[in-house]
């Protein structure tokens, strides 16, 4: 829902830039993929609960805080990293492709019949 919109806007807003070295205070591509994946799954879970929008937003915010804590990052680090990748299209494309691959792989695993 909201994350999908952010991802699409991020892709559209990305401008071409020369390849730069990622600053130390920016999440690695792997960390970014894992964090985005966790956020996407959490958002999907919340959307299936059938909560009113204001309750869903509050619940999702708490889930985000927990996910960031579990990942050992802050909301600010995530936002700064997200902004960095969106402004570096070649790197954003790698993150986004890895995210889609990861989500597709998980979906395939979940659809396999149990032995």
Image (spheres, helix red, strand yellow):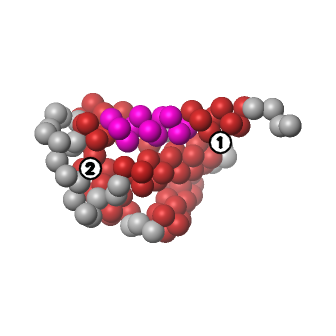
In the displayed structure, 25 sits above or below 79; it is below
Judge whether 111 appears above or below 77 on screen: above
Residue span colored magenta = 93-103
Residue 89: x and y in percent read 24, 37
- The majority secondary structure of the magenta stretch comes to helix
Q: Residues within 10 Å of mark 2 (few under 14, many from 20)?
A: some
Local crowd at mark 1 within 10 Å, few (<14), some, or many (≥20)?
A: few
| Residue 53 seen anywhere in this rendered image of the structure | no
Q: Is residue 95 left or right of residue 110?
A: left
What residue sits 32% from the left and 50% below the top? 82
Of the two numbered discs 2 and 1 on the same chain, state the one appearing first in sequence: 1
Residue 71 screen position, x and y as percent: 48, 64
Disc 2 target residue: 83
- 74 is higher (above) or lower (below) than 12: below
The image quadrant of residue 114 is top right
Could you say whether the residue bearing mark 2 is in a helix, strand or loop? Answer: helix
> Which one is nearer the viewer's eye here, 95 or 63?
95
Determine if residue 16 is in view: yes
Secondary structure found at label 1: helix
Coordinates of residue 81 in the picture (x, y in percent): 30, 54
- Residue 41 at x, y percent in the picture: 57, 46
In screen coordinates, is 57 left or right of 25?
A: right
Q: Which mark is residue 91?
A: none
Which residue is most to the left? 18
Specify the quadrant that holds the C terminus: top right
Q: Is residue 97 magenta?
A: yes
Q: Whole-Å distance between the Cαs marked 2 and 1?
A: 28 Å
**Mark 1 sits on what residue?**
48
Residue at image point 38% right, 63% down? 75
């Amino acid at each position: 829902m909201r994350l999908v919109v952010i991802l699409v806007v991020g892709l559209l807003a990305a401008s071409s830039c020369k390849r730069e070295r990622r600053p130390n205070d920016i999440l690695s591509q792997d960390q970014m993929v894992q964090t985005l994946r966790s956020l996407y799954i959490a958002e999907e879970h919340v959307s299936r609960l059938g909560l009113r929008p204001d309750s869903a937003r509050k619940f999702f915010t708490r889930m985000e805080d927990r996910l960031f804590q579990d990942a050992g990052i802050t909301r600010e680090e995530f936002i700064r990293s997200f902004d960095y990748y969106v402004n570096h299209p070649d790197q954003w494309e790698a993150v986004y492709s890895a995210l889609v691959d990861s989500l597709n792989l998980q979906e395939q695993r979940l659809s396999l019949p149990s032995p």
